[in-house]
Amino acid sequence: MKKILIVSHAMEIGGAETALLGLLETIDTKKYEVDLFLMRHHGQLMQYIPDMINLLPEIPQYASLAVPIHTVIKNRQLGMAIKRAIGKYEAGRRVRKLGVSGQSDIALEYSHKYTKDIMPQISDKEYDLAISFLTPHYFVMEKTQAKNKIAWIHTDYSMINIDVESELKMWSKYNRIVSISDNVTESFLKVFPSLKSRMIVIKNIMPIKYMKKLTDSFSVETEMPADGSVKLLSIGRFTSAKKFDEVPAICKKIRNRGINAKWYLVGYGGEEKLIRQKIAEVQAEEFVIILGKKENPYPYIKACDIYLQPSRYEGNSVAVREAQILNKPVIITNYTTAESQLKDGYDGIIVPMEIEESAKEIARIIADKNLQKKLIVNTKQSDYTNTNEIEKLYRIIKD
């Protein structure tokens, strides 16, 4: 049997992790022996890793990357603490030299870049294919043995701040670079044009067995009551990318048009305080409701009337795909990769990014029941599973 190794961070609730479940569900384990290495055996999705996948043991050095440095010192991993401190310092220097403002991925990249030298081998096996599923991509390249190594892209590179020179060296070592959509590929190649010959698109494979099992597992009536309101729903980490901080203002303007709408937010993250602040500023406590982190989002999608993804940027939103699979009308903002997400007017609607125009268009769609029915019918006639994409991975192994 051919041997495949997949390396990722953890199994927290998130789009990339859901896509990883889809990949694990779909690989033919009668033909391929699949090992999964997670840096941390943590996250609500751990329990859904398919039984036929061999989960490798956690290694303390890798697990220490996502905990505070003082905890690493307390655990007597002094070498790791020193390397992480150096990485943090060098990342800060690099950010200042590049003149980067706002959020960047440089600190995360450098935390891996400066610790890789003291990391142990992930496995003693030699694999036919090793996959680095989430960036940074240093460990698969330097701490595994494989005939073929590939790295995955999940985000829109036109929207994030990175150290281009440093990342180019990282990406260049891989035989293939997998992008989740044509738009993601295009944005990536604007930053790294020299890597064009290595690119291949493999769309997110949806974990249908997992979704079917969980969709009807419980009722959300107490959290999303049938009170006559139009139930809007958004799911995602509370980060700047998802733009949930503008939801209160948008929802307020929708209601000012005479529409009894309530907007529910499922997720967690560092911007929760900001979102709550924005809710308070427009006195939206009664109609913008934070439901928090949910292990199983599917009953909430099933209960909503319209699913919205009001993001500033996306690679390819898994939550949008989940809503389409569950036959919901979907609205997304006009982020860079929006056109790769849906067919505007067919199985979803793309609305402007600006608050005023966004609210106006969302209100129009809420009022147009025939349009909503059309979107629902078209999702039922579409296949969003992408299970045939696994053949591209098989071809990489054969090549």
Image (spheres, rainbow, N blue to C red):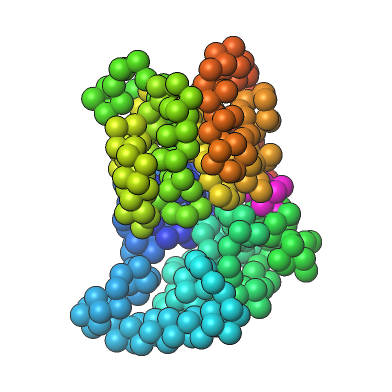
Instruction: Tell me where residue 327 appears, x and y as whole percent.
Output: 52, 22
Q: Is residue 35 visible?
A: no
Q: Residue furthest left?
A: 74
- In the image, taking residue 281 as reference, residue 370 lies left or right, namely right
Q: Position of residue 43 (x, y in %)?
A: 32, 51
Q: Is residue 200 above or below residue 310?
A: below
Viewer-side residue, 317 vs 290:
290
Point out residue 71 in the picture as x, y percentages from the top left corner.
24, 75
Examine the rendered structure and indicate whether residue 61 appears above or below residue 14: below
Quadrant for residue 371, please give it. top right
Q: Is residue 182 magenta?
A: yes
Residue at the image point whose x is 56% and y is 59% from the top:
131
Residue appearing at x 53%, y 64% in the figure:
135
Q: Tell me the magenta residue range.
A: 180-185
* Front residue of 132 and 181: 181
Left-right relation of 165 to 310: right
Question: Magenta: predominant secondary structure element?
Answer: helix
Q: Quadrant of the C terminus?
A: bottom right
- The spot of residue 138 in percent (x, y) is 53, 72
The residue shown at (54%, 72%) is 101
Q: Residue at x 32, y 54 (%)?
A: 273
Q: How many marks?
A: 0
Spot the residue most to the top: 370
- One can see residue 265 in this view: yes
- 170 part of magenta stretch: no
Camera-side residue of 357 and 333: 357
